[in-house]
Amino acid sequence: MEIDNKFSYLNMQKLSVLELQETLAEFPHSRFVDLKEISPSGFIFCTSYNSEKGNHLSHSPKISLLAWWDHIGYQIRVVGTAKRISEDLADKFWLTRSKEAQVATTCFKQSEVWDSEGSMENHFSSAIAASEASISRPSSWGGYSVTPHSIEILKFKVNRVHTREYYWGEGASWKMWMLQP
Ligand SMILES: Cc1cc2nc3c(=O)[nH]c(=O)nc-3n(C[C@H](O)[C@H](O)[C@H](O)COP(=O)(O)O)c2cc1C
């Protein structure tokens, strides 16, 4: 299917960050996360399950994603449903992380309040100094795979006649509309 080819193409490009947005609260919340992979089951990102976004997603898995590949001029917008990835897959992504990232995950509670930058740095330095060569993934860290309900792929054009392909569907039956730029 054509859309799969586009995703294989995007998977081969430089890693992108996603803007991830959910609207459980009164106002929408958004932040960047690394797009780890576009797999047949969806768009994968990793984070702490106990973070603000993790808490929101455990109440409502509805989510929107926005990615921009500057060097090729591709924007994708996805609306979908997030579900946790398997423990095995979370372990795979955990092992790709730097030591600093692993220690930061284990010594901090993402999204919780702290008193000062200086004491946060001290806490981190002590945690790095005390860390083992191999750090196990905490069960509170993992990832989500977002199954798309709709996808818009925009190919930027300098003359502003951007191509906008809007896909909507489920499973294998997808429909595509061209949208005006
Ligand atoms: C370029 C960039 C990439 C980021 N990647 C991630 C990521 O992959 N996972 C993550 O949990 N946070 C990532 N962050 C931090 C998030 O934007 C966010 O601050 C953090 O996840 C806490 O979000 P929350 O409190 O809304 O849950 C990234 C930030 C930036 C600027």
Image: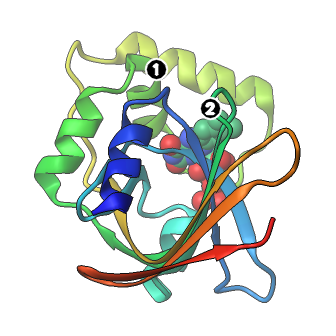
In the depicted structure, whether residue 158 falls above or below residue 131: below
Residues 46 and 10: in front is: 10
Q: Residue 69, labelled with which disc? A: none
Q: Which residue is mark 1?
A: 100
| Residue shown at 34% from the left, 56% from the top | 143
Q: Amino acid at mark 2?
A: Ile
Question: Is 49 on the left-hand or right-hand side of 109?
Answer: left
Question: Is 20 on the left-hand or right-hand side of 7?
Answer: right
Can the viewer see residue 107?
yes
Q: Residues within 10 Å of mark 2 (few under 14, many from 20)?
A: few
Q: Amino acid at mark 1?
A: Glu
Q: Residue 148, image x and y in percent?
A: 42, 74
Q: Secondary structure at mark 2?
A: loop
Looking at the rendering, which quadrant does residue 74 occupy?
top right
Q: Residue 94, image x and y in percent?
A: 28, 36
Residues 134 and 149: in front is: 149
Give the color scheme: rainbow, by chain, secondary structure or one colour.
Answer: rainbow
Quadrant where the image shows the C terminus: bottom right
Q: Residue 72, labelled with which disc? A: 2
Work out whether mark 2 precedes mark 1 in sequence or the reverse, and give the earlier one.
2
Residues 123 and 167: in front is: 167
Cα distance in 3D space between marks 2 and 1: 31 Å
| Residue shown at 22% from the left, 12% from the top | 133
| Residue shown at 81% from the left, 82% from the top | 27
Q: Secondary structure at mark 1?
A: helix
Quadrant where the image shows the N terminus: bottom left
Question: Is 124 on the left-hand or right-hand side of 144?
Answer: right
Q: Are marks 2 and 1 in contact (CB under 8 Å)?
A: no
| Residue shown at 38% from the left, 61% from the top | 3
In the depicted structure, whether residue 71 falls above or below residue 113: above
Looking at the rendering, which quadrant does residue 101 occupy?
top left
In the depicted structure, whether residue 27 falls above or below residue 106: below
